[in-house]
Image (cartoon, rainbow, N blue to C red):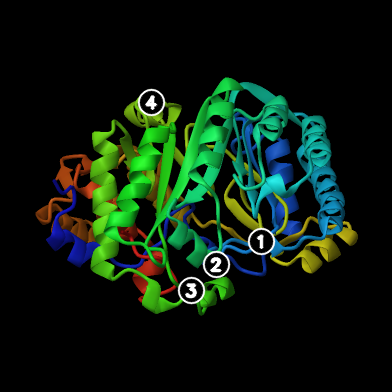
Amino acid sequence: MSLLNPKLLGQYDVPGPRYTSYPTADRFVGAFGHTQYVQALRQRQQGLGLRGIPLSVYVHIPFCASLCYYCACNKIITKQYSQAERYLKSLGREIDLTVAQLGRGQPVSQLHWGGGSPTFLRNEDMRALKERLTDAFQWVPGGEYSIEVDPRTVDASRLAVIRELGFNRLSLGVQDFEPAVQKAVHRIQSTQDVQNLMVAARALGFESVNLDLIYGLPMQTAASFERTLDQVIELHPERIALYAYAHLPERFKPQRRIHAVDLPAPASKVGMMQRALVRLVEAGYVYIGMDHFALPDDDLAVAKRQGRLHRNFQGYSTQPDSDLIALGVSAIGRVGATYSQNAKTLEAYEDLLALGQLPVERGLLLSRDDLVRRTIIMALMCQGHVSIESIETSHLIDFRKTFAGELLELKQMQDSGLVTLEGDAINVTEQGWYFVRAVAMVFDRYLRADQDRARFSKII
């Protein structure tokens, strides 16, 4: 059984954005900084934009005790805990400065701690940070409150603390269970440790556990990845994120420790992905889109069935389309018609805060064209459906005139079976859902003008 047409793979497996935003972060400019971000926060506080919709909050904890060679995240490898203590003080200042502009007690329905590894923090510091956030924001009952967990540094007692802090969802970094692969990427952890955490999480009442997997890693083979899939399916997590490893050593220094000769051949890598799709669907998982799978009764699968999926800088979300307050070094947020990114280095982040400024280093004020294209791209990525009439009504444009070139490209995709163009609607087909990034790319004005796409990972 194969879910992917080999001819389509050859045609559409090209580099492209993941569209956690549009425009994508590589379009942000340095002219957007503290002043522009403060203006966006004040406009929301004054009742403009999405004020009536609860916020999403992201907190970046950049520290890790050891280096994973595949990692492309913004992280700081250290065993000196004093760095984390100093960072938390800066993070507290950023929270205070944000609340001063936004107003205290704004409702929040989605919280995510990422990194790095948030569980690098000691229990008492996790409590103190959550208390600081609780003083700043109001948590909405039934929200999605998640944290990334390193199974190598967390046991059942630490999970109990995390649950006590109000988190109801976990994401465990697994990547691969094979010892040879783990050694090649410098991340050794046992299947038993992950299983113990899964058992503890369910006993503690966590609503959902996600496991992260990566295919295309060094020393992986079709047979070894099959064994990893066996173990993952047996663990039966509510969600699975299945990522393709993008080997870009010229951009990400840790990847220079991975020898290209140890990587699986492109055909083998695609075969792993195809096999994973088949195995997970046969095991009862719903393919959400992009890299995500969920059990049918998980909120993510329910949101997809009901057409309520949204997408932000953390990926697919069940929460309503909302402003995202991003806290911490390198964190990316969205407020109104703006995107912002904090300084990427700890030194620059601390320096800006020491000046009494929000640590925004770059960002973007979206144009009218950006906004309409964002609406279309997110509709494709989340619902697989675009209503032309709805776009025309909400953005006051002639869709067929404005996007004449794009519609011609979509007709070619219709011939390939990826979309259907029927009357007033653009619909992504079942086959096209696996190539939805390629469909969305049709409406990316920046990408159409810039053929240098090598900076992006491949779609499959």
Q: Give yes or no for contact between labels 2 and 3 (Cβ–Cβ under 8 Å).
A: yes
The answer to whether one can see residue 289 in this image is no
**Tag nearer the camera, 3 or 4:** 3
Give the residue pinned by disc 1.
66
Image coordinates of residue 172 in percent, x first then y, are 54, 43
SS state under label 1: loop
Image coordinates of residue 332 in percent, x first then y, are 62, 54
Q: Give yes or no for contact between labels 1 and 3 (Cβ–Cβ under 8 Å).
A: no
Residue 302's disc is: 4
In the rendered image, the vertical position of residue 85 relative to residue 385, given as above or below: below
Say whether residue 212 is left or right of residue 113: left
Residue depicted at x 42% and y 34%:
235
Q: Give yes or no for contact between labels 2 and 1 (Cβ–Cβ under 8 Å).
A: no
SS state under label 4: helix
Give the residue pinned by disc 3.
258
**Tag nearer the camera, 1 or 4:** 1
